[in-house]
Amino acid sequence: MTVFAAASLTDVFKAMAKPFTVEHDNYALTFSFAGSQQLVTQLEQGARADAIATADRATIGRVPRRGPHRPPVVFAENRLVIAVRSGNPDGVRRVADLSRPGLRVVLAAPAVPAGRYARESLGRVHVTVNPVSLEDNVEGVVTKVGLGEADAGIVYATDATPGRGIEAVTIPDAENVRAEYLANAVPFGDQRAGGQAFVDFLLSSRGQDVLRRFGFLPAPS
């Protein structure tokens, strides 16, 4: 069984593989991680998957419908933070600082959920940023800041983890955006039951426990 998943879900979904297969030992689980928009494009071009998890509602709405299906479900939420280089040498304290002349800012591209969320946050404080690069997924933003190729970027809170050469600057609620993660089975032949089993696992108490352990906010009740 193959699950397509947004790049920001890489660590938490890998941690889910063992508990899922313990409950469903008739499935061998394989993940394919990329930007949400890239995953949907692959499905539109004929790629096969049994379930998909994206980082926003608009993207999962583009998934081709090739048979009976249930609507996608929100299984977790996330928040934005400003990723800065370790030690925050540029003294970035708030979203408005990202417009500071000379500060190298990197963002996810507008087609990427993380990029859309970032622009919504910037819009709330009426800040214009000219990024030095636009990345295909949020992992690209984290990597460039961690390597010192950029001074700051907007990422999900779950991406700003220790050991990546970055640290997180909190964005207050009034300037923040709540990111939604949605999942759906992709109905292809006999494997669709497996895809739905994985979606159901995400909503189960065990799946939600793993998500919380990795810093994701619980699915809305």
Image: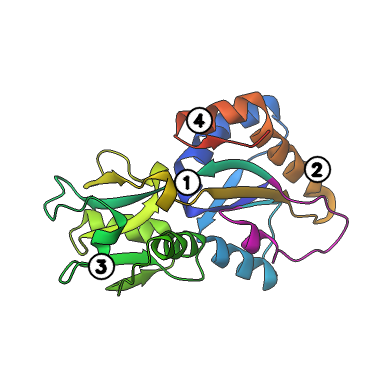
Q: Earlier in the sequence, mark 2 or mark 4?
A: 2
Residue at the extreme right of the image, as rendered: 68
Please provide percent x and percent y for residue 177. 48, 52
Please provide percent x and percent y for residue 213. 46, 28
Which is more toward the observer, 22 or 107?
Answer: 107
Q: Earlier in the sequence, mark 3 or mark 2?
A: 3
Examine the rendering and report whether any part of residue 144 can be seen: no
- The region drawn magenta spans 54-73
Mark 2 → mark 4, Cα distance in angstroms: 26 Å
Q: Earlier in the sequence, mark 2 or mark 1?
A: 1
Q: Earlier in the sequence, mark 3 or mark 1?
A: 1
**Disc 4 residue type (three-letter):** Arg
Mark 2 → mark 1, Cα distance in angstroms: 23 Å
Is label 2 or label 1 in front? 1
Is label 4 or label 3 in front? 3
Judging by the rendered image, the residue that carries numbered circle 4 is 212
Is label 3 or label 2 in front? 3
**Disc 2 residue type (three-letter):** Ala
**Disc 3 residue type (three-letter):** Ser
Q: Earlier in the sequence, mark 4 or mark 3?
A: 3
Mark 3 → mark 2, Cα distance in angstroms: 48 Å
- The numbered dot on residue 126 is none
Mark 3 surroundings within 10 Å by alpha-carbon count, few (fewer than 14), some (14 through 19), many (20 or more): some
